[in-house]
Structure formats: C-alpha cells, structure tokens
Amino acid sequence: MKMNIGNCEVLLDYPIANLEKLIGEKRAVIITDSNVRKYHENKFPKAPVIEIGQGEEIKTLKTLEQIYEKMLNLELDRASVVIGIGGGIVCDIAGFVASTYCRGMKLILVPTTLLAQVDAGIGGKNGVNFKGYKNIIGTFRQPDAVLVDTSLLETLDLEEMKCGYAEVVKHAAIADEKAFENLENCDDLFSVSNLKDIVPKCAAVKVNVVIADEHEHGERMKLNFGHTIGHAVEKILKLPHGQAVAIGMVAEGKIAVQRGLLGEKEMSRLENLLEKIGLGTKAKMDAKEVVDAIRHDKKRRDESLKMPLLCGIGNAKIVEVSLEEMERVINDLY
Ligand SMILES: NC(=O)c1ccc[n+]([C@@H]2O[C@H](COP(=O)([O-])OP(=O)(O)OC[C@H]3O[C@@H](n4cnc5c(N)ncnc54)[C@H](O)[C@@H]3O)[C@@H](O)[C@H]2O)c1
Ligand SMILES: [Zn+2]
C-alpha cells in the first residue's frame, strides 16, 4: 500500500531490500543506533553508517553536532540522501539532520519500532530535547520517503512492542472503529504476521490526519489523545511513554464519559483492549501534581487547554478542558 503526504511517499509494508532502488545513484549516509545495527545491518544498503547511542538522553544538540562533523568528513552535500533506520529517536534525529545540514538534504526513513512505524516515522515532525523540554528544537520537514517493513519488528522486545501498541490503540480509537474491532478480535497481537495487517491500517490513520493538517492547527491535535495526561504521568511516575499514554487515554476517556461524549460501554472497550495488550490502565497519582505538570508542559499559565476527547470509538474532537475539571476527574479516578 502506498500513500502520499505531498511529495512524501509512505510505502506501507515494503521490504527494506527495496531501499537500494529508492536511493538510486545518489550518495547516501545511514543514521542508526547500535541495537538496530546489530540486528539488521545485513539488510542495510551500501553506504557509510553513523551510529548513535540509545535513549532519550542522546536526543540532544550535542549528538547533532557529532553527526554534522561526521557528515563533513564524509564530504556529503545537498544532493546526498540521509537514511534514518531505527526507532523514533533515530527518525527524529535523522529528520532534523536532513532538514538542517546544507539547508536541507533528501531524507528516507525506515522506522524499526512499532511506535515509529505507526507514529514517529510519519508526519515530518522531528527534533531534539533541550533544557528538559522534549522535542523543543526541531522542524516540520516531510521525508522524501518512509518505508515501513513490518518484518523488522521481529527483533523488537515485548516491552517496546506493548508501548508501541499504545499508539496503535490511539490511532484506532480516534479514527478507525473497524481497526479497533480487529484489535479486539485479534488472537495474537504480537505475531509479526498479524502486525503485517495491523501496522498499515494504523499508520494510514496518521497519514490521513497529517494530510488534513500538516502543521498542527486542528485535526493533527487529535493525535495527542491520551498524551496531555500521559506526558504528565510519564514525568511524575517515570513510566515508559506507552504505559503512561495508556493511563492517559483512560483518564482522558473518563473526562469524555463525564461530558457525555463517550458511553460507559465504549470506555470499557478501551480499558479491556489496553489490558489485553498488557498495558496498565490506572496508576496512583496526585491529581494536583498531574495538573501542575500539565501546566509546566504547556509552558504557560492558562487555566484551560484544547485537547482531543473521544466521542465514540473511532471518533474524536478537539474541545476546551479546564485544568480544574481535569483535576476533579483525576481525583475521582484514584
Ligand atoms: N516525530 C514524531 O512525530 C514523533 C511521534 C512520536 C514519538 N516521537 C519520538 O519517538 C521517540 C521514541 O521512539 P521509540 O519508542 O521508537 O524509541 P527508540 O527509538 O528509543 O527505540 C526503542 C528501543 O528499541 C530499539 N530498537 C529499535 N528498533 C528495533 C528493532 N527492530 N529490533 C530491536 N530493537 C530495536 C532501540 O535501539 C531502542 O533501544 C521519542 O523520542 C519521541 O519523542 C516522535
Ligand atoms: Zn506518544
């Protein structure tokens, strides 16, 4: 399946072996991390490799500087192609590099985690962290191509897979009821043969949302479902992103239930699916601390914010929610 975001070709379920064809005669450099290199280097096209470390801590300007230096040594120029092969961290860094080195180079992304295949690798947002703020330095820059090969997920560990599923559920919940039902009925969510069907459908949700609103003025905000409270939970409880987003989706779902946008039955479907995946749906937390973290995250002192709420499974809308309402709902939850 092939989709387009402007000039960006999103090739869903496309073997990595076809990368050579996409590069053609152009000079290329591969940016990857040590894990991905270890497992998949034998499938990389012939090109120099720049390997970065792992973890959120390496998403810094310093890492960028090291990459730029290596690129200078390789005498790469604007006509060369940057190929990012890795999870969301590699995709975000490779995207920023391609967007800035020589004022912009060609970019091909090959996302290798479930999260990156349905989310981070698609949509043209990139960036690094700075002074404790996530992704605060970055650009909007569509890649020339995104190649999604689900067979690369074979080597991904179970915890990473579960975390990626939080975004899969998010996409189905905000825009594709049929995909949500398929997840509910799937007998083995972690088998790569089932992911071959699941990933393209949920990646397509992101592609369509980005087509509708590339620069996040409205529709694209729906992708934040579960993330307003999720990011706060991630920070306070130091949970992995996907686990925090699962808790965030449930808490934000309850706000929707209280507002009469989401039925109790639909709320239970969301909770049951997350539990089936093995993601927690609740955590003990202090509502005031959560709301303070949200305020800090937004970098402003407003007493309300715009966020997506579910109105049914497969449907979401952007509404204004006051922090006071949020605090009340979180307080009632735990
Ligand atoms: N740009 C966007 O729109 C966007 C959207 C969502 C998330 N993100 C960013 O994505 C990042 C998180 O991405 P992530 O969850 O993919 O994390 P990640 O890139 O750190 O990858 C997770 C782990 O899996 C390993 N790994 C990657 N592919 C593998 C494979 N095929 N087999 C075995 N191991 C593999 C990595 O080495 C790493 O240890 C965050 O920094 C977040 O800000 C960006
Ligand atoms: Zn997320």
Image (cartoon, helix red, strand yellow):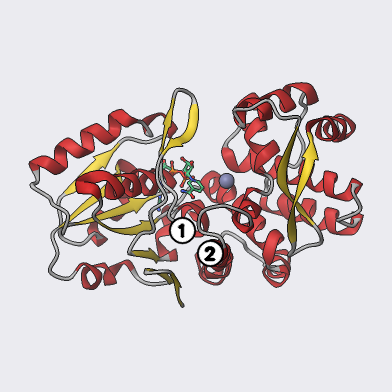
Rendered-image quadrant of the C terminus: top right
Give the image location of residue 175, x and y in percent.
68, 65
The residue to which callout 2 is attached is: 203
Given the image, on which type of amino acid does mark 2 rest?
Ala
The residue depicted at 43 percent of the width and 32 percent of the height is 129
Q: Residue at x 49, y 24 (%)?
A: 132
Ligand 1 within 8 Å of the CB at mark 1? yes
93 left or right, relative to 294:
left
**Element under label 1?**
loop
Task: Give the residue pinned by disc 1.
Answer: 122
Whether residue 38 is visible, yes or no, is: no
- Quadrant of res 238: top right
Whether residue 212 is visible: yes
Judging from the image, what secondary structure is the residue with disc 2 in?
helix
Q: Could you say which quadrant of the image residue 70 lies in?
A: top left
Image coordinates for residue 274, horizontal then vertical, percent: 72, 51
Instruction: Identify which residue is drawn at 76% across, 30% down.
Output: 303
Asked if disc 1 and disc 2 are in contact, CB closer than 8 Å, the reply is: yes
Which of the two residues, 334 or 69, is positioned nearer the viewer here? 69
